[in-house]
Amino acid sequence: MKKILLSFFILFISIQAFSQVTFPRNGSYDERPAQYAFKNATIVVDAQTVLDNAMIYIKNGIIESVGKDLKIPAGTVTYDLKGKRIYPGLIDIYSDYGMPEIVRPQGGRGFGGPAQFESNKKGAYDWNQAVKPEIAAGKEFKANAQKAAELRKIGFSAASVHIADGIVRGSGALVTLGEGKEHELLLKEKASAHYSLNKGTSTQSYPVSMMGSVALLRQTYYDAEWYKKGGNKEERNLSLEAFNEIQDLPQIYDANDKLGILRGDKIGKEFKVQYIFKGIGDEYQRIDEIKATGSSLILPLNFPTAYDVEDPFDAAQVSLTEMKHWEMAPFNASYVAKAGINFALTTNSLRNKADFWTNLRKAIESGLSESKALEALTSTPAKLLKVDNMLGSLKKGMIANFIITSDNLFSKDNVIYENWIQGKRYIISDMNVTDIRGVYDLSVGNKTGLKLNISGKVDKPEYQIIANDTIKTTPKVTRLSDLFTISTKLDRKDAGDTRLSGYYDGKNIKGDGVLPDGKQVKWSAIYKEAAKDVAKKDTAKAKTPVAGTILFPFTAYGSETKPQQETMLIKNATVWTNESEGIVQNTDVLLQNGKIAKVGKNLSAPAGAKTIDGTGKHLTNGIFDEHSHIALFSINEIQSVSAEVRQEDVVNSEDINIYRQLAGGVTSSQLLHGSADCIGGQSALIKLKWGENPNNLLIKGADGFIKFALGENVKQGNSSSATSRFPATRMGVEQIYMDAFQRATEYEKAWKAYNALGNKNGVTPPKKDLELDALVEIINKKRFITCHSYVQSEINMMMKVAETFNFNINTFTHILEGYKLADKMKNHGVAASTFADWWAYKMEVKEAIPYNAAILTKMGVNTAINSDDAEMARRLNQEAAKTVLYGGVSEEDAWKMVTLNPAKMLHLDNRLGSIKAGKDADVVLWNNNPLSIYARPEKTIIDGTVYFDVEKDDQMRQQVAKERNRLMLKMLAEKSGGAPTQRPAPRRNLQIHCDTIMEMGVTENRGESSEEMTEFNHSHEKH
C-alpha cells in the first residue's frame, strides 16, 4: 500500500511541475520542483559511453547531472536501481503519431470518372493538390493516449511526426510520447520537411505517373525559386512561401524502394538538396550505388513473412525476387551499417508495433551490432533532426527522456520497467516484482511427489505442474504482487479443479487450498532449482542466420557479380558489317576497351584476350529497337502537353524484359512515352546492360528525343470514360501543336530579352517552365520528335506544323500509311519506323499494307522496323526478314532496318549500327543467318561486355531452379515450425505497347512482366 501511495505522490508532483501558466488553475498546487535521483544503475549515456554503478539526477524534466558520487539536494526522491540499466529514450524519426487519419478518396480517376485538371482546394495555394508545403504537422498534432502508450511500451519517448500525404507534404513536428496537453508535448513545431512521389489523396488528375510526379516536384522547386526572386510581385502564393520557409529544415524523402533512392538523389543533386531517404528495407540490393549518394537513410523493420508454398500452384506465383527478399530482409540494416551509411530505424510500416523488438533482434542476429542499433534509435535520429542538444543521449541539460530496463536493452529476456518522458514517470512493468522462476516440490494436503515449474519471463512467468515426472498440466494462475491463486486438476480422476491460494515467502510459496470435493487443505511449493526452460536455454547454441547471395539485378537470371568488360577476338565469323564491305566471310573482329578495335582477316589476339571461335557463325552489330516501352515504371501522363516528363526518371533496370531481349540480340532501345498525349514525354535511350543501375543504362552523350502522337489515342476516340480534356477532334490536335509552339516561342523571347539586360537588378526573370523548355529545344533543333502516326492526312498536317516553326519531324513511328506520301516525307527529311506486317487491329490501320517498309525504303526514306511490344522485340531479326518476303528488300538492307537505320534516326550512327573500327563494341554472335527463323544469339555483347551467353543461360536456368527449391524448403520448414505464412498474390504478365492503353488514368507499368514467366518459360527459345 505504501508503494502505491508513493507512486501516486510522485506522479502528482511531476504533473504539477509541468503545468503551464497560460492555463488557469483551480485550487492550490504543490509548486516544489520535481527532483529525482536514480543511483547504483548501469547508465548507457550513449552507444559509446557506459557508466557502471552510476547516478543520474533530474530536475523539472531536465537532466542536471550524470556520473558517480553526485551530491543530491535535499527533498530529492531517490530510486535505488541496483542491477538495472538506464538508456536514452528511443526516437522514432518517421511516425504518424498524433496525426489526423488520411482518408483516401473513393474510386478515383480511372475508367469510370471524368478528369479533374484544376485544383479543388480553395485559397491562395498551389495549382496542384498534391503540393501542400503549407501543411504543418505541429498545428495538426493531437495527443493520442492509446497510441502513445503503445509506443512507450516498446521504449519510445519521442517521435518526429508528419502527415504522409502528397508529393510535397509540408513540415513535420517533434513531439514527446507522454500524457498531457499538446502544449506540453510539442517540442518543435517545424522539425523536418517531407516529400514523396505519391500524390496521395489528391483527386486532381495530374500526375498519374511516377515520371509526372518527378516533373511536378522539379517544377515546384523552380517555381519556388522564381517566387523568391520576385515572382511574388505577380501573384501571392501561400504554398510557395511555405515551401521556401521549410528548405532549411532536414529534408526527408519517402523513396519507396532502392531505385527510388537513386531517383530522389538525382532530384536532390539538381537542386543542391541532401535528402534523408526513407526506404523500404531493400537497400542491400544496391548498396554501393546508395552509398555513393552520400545520403542518410531511415530503415523500417517490416520483414516479410514466409510464403505458403505447399501448393505447387501457389509456389509458382512467388517470384525468386520475393523469395530471396524474404530471406535477406533481416540482413538489410547490417549491410547498410557495414557500408558505412548513416541510418536511423523506425517503427513505420509495422502493422503491429509489438513486432518491433522481435524484428530488431532478428536484425541483430543477422549481423547488426547492438551499438549501431542503439545509435539508430537515439543519437542518429536526434542528429538528423538537429535536436541532439535535446534528445538522443543522457547528458547535462538534455530533456529527461530515458528508459529503465532489467537487462541489456536488446536481450530477449529484457524487461522495460519504466519510461520517463520529460521527467515524468510511466510504469510499463513493475520493477519491484519478485523473480519466482524455478522448480518447486509441490505438496497439496496428503498429495506429494508433485513439481511446480515456473519459467518464462520475470514479469510474465509460465506455470506447469508435473506429476510422476510425466503427467504435465498447465494451471490457471492469477497473481497480484506476491499473492497467488492457482486452479488446476492435480489428478486425472479429479472431477473438478483444485484451487490453491497462497503467497511468496522467501524462496517458497505456501497457503491454503480447496480440493474438488470442498475439503480445505494446506499446500506448499519448496524451491529446488532453476526453471527447466532457463537451464535449457543456457546450454543451447543459437543458430546464426546465413545470408543468401545478392544478385545484379536482384531477380531471376541476375548474377552474383556484374559482368565485366573484356578484350575479345572473334575469329573466322561471317561478319555483317553494314558498311561498304557488306557481308564478309571468315573475318576476325577484335573488341578492346569497349570499342571495335580491328576488323580483318588473320588478326592476332593481344595478350590476355579471350578468343572466340566464330567458324560457321554470323557476327552482327546489336539490334537497335527504335520504339520500345520496356524497363519503365511509367508509360503515359494525362495532359495534352506533357513535355516536362522524362522517361529517364523512371527506368526500371530490374525489368526481366531486358534479359529477354538480350536473348534476342537487342542491345539498345529508345524508351518512349505512350500515345495518350499530343505531346508526350522525353525519351530515354538505353543500352540493355543487365545488372547495372538505371543511370548506367542511359546512353551518355545521346541527343534528346521526345514522343508526339496523332489520331484516335490523343483525341480519346476509343475511350470508354467521360473526359473533359481538349482535344476531342483531329482538328483540335493540330491546334494543340500550334498553341504549344506559339507559347514556346514567346517563352524563348522572354528569356532572350531578360538575358540581354545589362543590369538585371530588380528585374524578375521569367519563370522556368520545364514543359516549354523541352519545346524550345525542339524549335532550336536540340531535341527531336518521334511521332506516333497512322493516317495520311494527319502525317501531312504534322509536317506542315513543324515547317511553320522552322524545324523538322525526326521520325514518324507506326507510319502505316507512309507509302501514300513517301515522296513528301523524303522532301521533309523525316525517317520512318514501322511494323513489318501489323494491321487490322483498329480502324486507323485498316489501309496498312505489308509492303510499306519496302516502298518507303525504295523512295529513299530512312526506314526501320520497330517492336512497340516487349514480346516482338525478342524477334526483331525475324520482323526484319519479313521485308525480304513482302517487298523484295535485300538481306543487307533488311538487316539495316533493325540496326544501322534506327541508329541513324537516333543520331547515334557514329557510334552504333555497324561493325567498324572505332565504334562501340555492341555485337551479337548468331548460330545462323540472323534473318533465319532458326537463328539465335549465342553471345550478346555491349561495350565489350558479355551480357547474354547461351551457355551461361543454361547454367542459370539450373541455378534458378535450385535456388527456388532451396528457398521453398526453407519456407516449408518455417511453416512446420509454427511460423506465420502469407498466401502468394496472383501474378499478371503485362506486355505494353502504344495502343494497349487508351485510358489516360491507366498509365503505370510497375514491372509486372513477371520474372517467374522467365523462370518457367524462358524467353530465349532453344529449339
Image: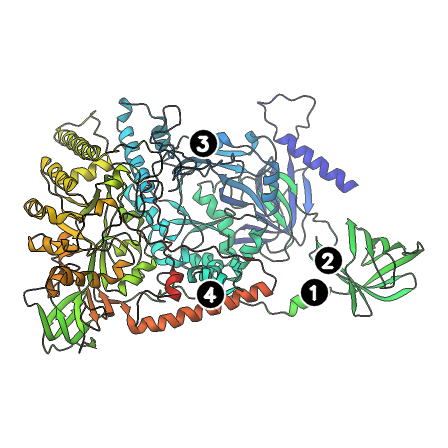
Mark 1 touching mark 2, by CB under 8 A? yes
Q: Which mark is residue 547?
A: 4
Residue 257 at least partly seen: yes
Which of the two marks, 1 or 4, is nearer to us in this view? 4
Q: Between residues 792 and 194, which one lies in front from this camera angle?
A: 792
Q: Between residues 584 and 855, which one lies in front from this camera angle?
A: 855
Residue 455, image x, y percentages: 72, 60
Residue at position x 69%, y 64% in the image: 534
Residue 637, image x, y percentages: 30, 41
Q: Which residue is mark 3?
A: 136
Q: Amino acid at mark 3?
A: Ala
Secondary structure of residue under mark 1: helix
Which quadrant would the N terminus be assigned to in this image? top right
Residue that sits furthest to the right in the current view: 519
Q: Earlier in the sequence, mark 3 or mark 2?
A: 3
Residue 30, image x, y percentages: 68, 28
Q: Amino acid at mark 2?
A: Glu
Q: Between residues 364 and 84, which one lies in front from this camera angle?
A: 364
Q: Earlier in the sequence, mark 1 or mark 2?
A: 2
Q: Which residue is mark 2?
A: 462
- The span from disc 1 to disc 3 (Cα, nearest Å) is 52 Å
Q: Earlier in the sequence, mark 1 or mark 4?
A: 1
Q: Which residue is mark 1?
A: 533
- The span from disc 3 to disc 2 (Cα, nearest Å) is 48 Å
Q: Amino acid at mark 1?
A: Asp
Q: Is residue 522 left or right of residue 271?
A: right
- The span from disc 1 to disc 4 (Cα, nearest Å) is 29 Å
Secondary structure of residue under mark 2: strand
